[in-house]
Amino acid sequence: ETTVVRMSQPPPQPVSAPPLAANLSRYEDSDGKFSFDYPKNWTVDRSEDGTITATDLFLRDAIIFVQTAQQGEPVSISQLMDAVKEGLAKQTGYVPLGDETVTIGGLAAVKHNFRVLDSPEFNNINTVGVAIVVRRGDNVVILLEFAAETAYENKKAVLDIIATSLVVK
């Protein structure tokens, strides 16, 4: 007489997405002034004027800009943010939402929240934006993040990772 023993197999485990950190790349500024993390499915370009642009490669519903400046005269980061806000105010539909002091890469920074409503510069869609100014010595880094208002809740975590990973050298 033959006895058949059947071994029960454990149920297959669901496949989970890898942690977000595994989906990130690190951008290192060629001038050695800053670095930041960004999703691997984004593209990063450097323009002739040195502005770094990072864009969601597939959805194109979020974009960041990073600019650097050498600070000759000693001014506060709040004063530097005032200059950034003057530039933003030139955008059609710009609505300031307030400032806060934050820490980025161990440095004090100013964060400015805003919206841009129905602006031709942004294909006539409403956008949500954040501007951050960080300084280490004379090296100033300005980070501008924009997302389509309809996509902001989905993009907020990614934009926060980009901002908090910023290192000014």
Image (cartoon, rainbow, N blue to C red):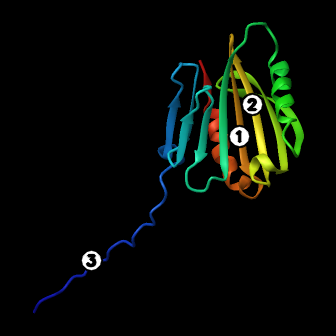
Is residue 81 shown left or right of residue 66?
right
- Residue 36 picture location, percent across and down: 57, 32
Residue at (72, 49) in percent of width and height = 147
Task: Tell me which label, 2 or 1, sits earlier in the chain.
Answer: 2
Mark 2 neighbour class, 10 Å CA radius: few under 14, some 14 to 19, many 20 or more = many
Mark 1 neighbour class, 10 Å CA radius: few under 14, some 14 to 19, many 20 or more = many
Q: Which residue is mark 3?
A: 7
- Residue 73 picture location, percent across and down: 78, 7
Q: Secondary structure at mark 2?
A: strand
Which quadrant of the rendered structure holds the C terminus? top right
The amino acid pointed to by label 2 is: Ile
Closest to the observer, 90 or 39: 90
Task: Tell me which label, 3 or 2, sits earlier in the chain.
Answer: 3
The amino acid pointed to by label 1 is: Glu
2 and 1 marks in contact (CB < 8 Å) = yes
3 and 1 marks in contact (CB < 8 Å) = no
Closer mark to the observer between disc 3 and disc 2? 2
Quarter of the view holding residue 59: bottom right
Q: Secondary structure at mark 3?
A: loop
- Residue 11 picture location, percent across and down: 39, 73
